[in-house]
Image (tube, rainbow, N blue to C red):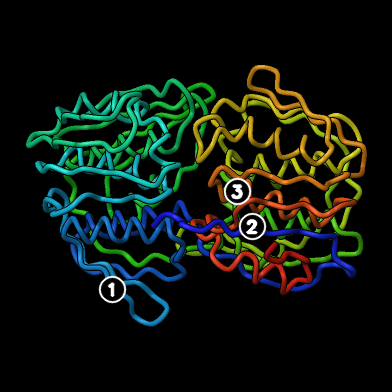
Amino acid sequence: MESLMPRPHRSTRPAAPLTGSIGVPGDKSISHRALMFGALAVGQTRISGLLEGEDVLRTAAAMRALGAEISRDGADWLVAGRGIGGLTEPADVLDMGNSGTAARLLAGILASHELYAVMTGDASLRKRPMARVIEPLKATGAQFFARAGNRLPLTIVGTREAMPLTYRLPVASAQVKSAILLAGLNARGVTEVEEPEPTRDHSENMLKHFGAEISVTRAGKGRVIRLTGQPELRAADVIVPGDPSSAAFPVAAALLVPGSQVTVTGAGLNKLRTGMFETLREMGAELAIQNARISGGEPVGDIVAAYTELRAVDVPAQRAPSMIDEYPILAVLCAAAKGTSHLRGLSELRVKESDRLTATAALLRVNGVRVEIKGDDLIIHGTGTIPGGGLVETHMDHRLAMSALVLGQASEAPVQIDDASFIDTSFPGFLRLMRGLGANMVAA
């Protein structure tokens, strides 16, 4: 549901350090996939720790509309699947809200099911291009009818006999890779995807968890994933770890506010998702991992972050896939660091919930930080202090909103955002959690 009334908020430097131990909501990427794979499996899947943000709830609603039975059982979610090829035609339009991940992955599922479906989304999602999944998925035999610019609403007419795909990703994208693999589940033969650089591998991990025949091999700097189609996926319980992209916000706030120490418990530490924490260590951040363990096939641990005077950093383009959602909050940290930081190869940020590259630069500029965009690189001139005092346009982008609110905890003057309502799409309870640590974030 689109927000009818904006919720402006103001963030002001707190009077005392941030302290406490918290858990963040479940990983959004894994939550989407758990619902989808559960719906495609035979039997009942129990999901613990599912992110109950708006994006994931849209996925749950879509899979229900396609015939899966999805219900709550206390804090857990139960999914009674239909089996590969068993989804049914939805009676109404599938509204994916703000979630590009849900829309793109679902396009892969729908392409190889013989049914007619229409997907739409909120104003932000309807601006985002879908060509990157439409073009390869056409080769399955499915038909796609989109608005100008390959944008939602999108009509998909799935095919009865889906062809397996062999596709090399032109740019590293876990969403496109996953869409192709999901289409390949109901295709006869082997679907093969080559990625130029490794991207988050939650789909591959979960396919193995549900019993699919899948292999991953190195190919130069990248990987080749091969999936045998039409397996019988077996229901398998899933424990969703805390989202490392969400953990980045309280960690960043602890690094910025003098005297702070914050622990984020049970965060996912998949090596293809932790580029942010690698970068923070290069900036000199005081970070420690405690209680490292494996949970539900994914590495998990507790992240302890303490205030640090950060130094500038040069982030190589090849690291982008492992931290693509964290660049706005990293940019805030670079603004507070001493020296000039270079964040390279950020073309993917232009097709997120907003043009995040341009919007992140604007977020910093309006708060007195000198910043430049050169091609796909973001250059931030940090001085160790952030003037603040700006009004940030969030463009209905939850990560921009949270990044600006964290920036206000370290700036000399308060920072205001035009709307906090979209934060719940990925991080329900963000404001309450941050206030519990001592942050000063209030309705404006």
Mark 1 = which residue? Answer: 71
Residue 341 appears anywhere in the view: no
Q: Secondary structure at mark 2?
A: loop
In the rendered structure, the answer to whether residue 349 lies left or right of residue 344 reads: left
The 10 Å Cα crowd at callout 2, few under 14, some 14 to 19, many 20 or more, is: some
Q: Secondary structure at mark 1?
A: strand
Name the amino acid, label 3.
Arg
In the rendered structure, the answer to whether residue 342 lies left or right of residue 249 reads: right
Choose mark 3 or mark 1, whichever is in front.
3
| Residue at the left extreme, as displayed | 160
Q: Count the marks.
A: 3
Q: Position of residue 394 (x, y in %)?
A: 61, 45
Mark 2 = which residue? Answer: 8
Q: Is residue 45 above or below residue 159?
A: below
Q: Nearer the viewer, residue 63 or 46?
A: 63
Mark 3 = which residue? Answer: 399
